[in-house]
């Protein structure tokens, strides 16, 4: 990841001897996005892919993502 210029934003464990710096704001944003994806998996329509057409399935994903992102 470092070769691509990506820095990790996961906080270290409390019992780690050397403290590793991380961006707390970026971690909070990452956590919110992960919760949104977890919420999308709870939607049965998305998990089982009821829609046959790709554009209809993508629309359902967008609606579920919007609801999960703003309700959490």
Image (cartoon, rainbow, N blue to C red):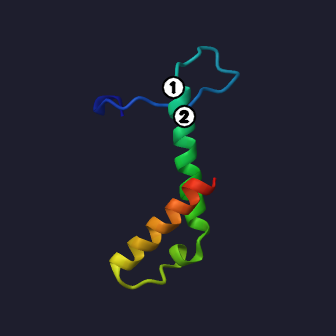
Quick one: 36 or 70, which is closer to the camera?
70
Residue 11: mark: none
Position of the N terminus by quadrant? top left
Observer-nearest of 29 and 2: 29
The residue furthest left is: 4
**Which residue is label 1 attached to?**
23
The image shows residue 22 at horizontal and vertical percentages of 52, 24
Label 2 crowd bin: few (<14), some (14–19), many (20+), radius 10 Å: some
Alpha carbon distance from label 2 to label 1: 6 Å
Q: Is residue 35 above or below residue 9?
A: below
Q: Are marks 2 and 1 in contact (CB under 8 Å)?
A: yes
> Is 25 left, or right, of 58 in this rendering?
right
**Residue found farthest to the right:** 15
Mark 2 = which residue? 27
Q: Give the percent coordinates (x, y) of residue 65.
A: 50, 61
Q: Residue at x 59, y 14 (%)?
A: 18
């Amino acid at each position: 990841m470092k070769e691509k210029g990506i820095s990790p934003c996961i906080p270290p464990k409390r019992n780690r001897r050397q403290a590793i710096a991380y961006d707390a704001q970026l971690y909070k944003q990452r956590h919110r996005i992960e919760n949104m994806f977890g919420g999308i998996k709870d939607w049965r329509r998305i998990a089982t892919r009821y829609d046959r057409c790709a554009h209809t399935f993508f629309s359902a994903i967008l609606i579920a993502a919007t609801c999960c992102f703003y309700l959490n």
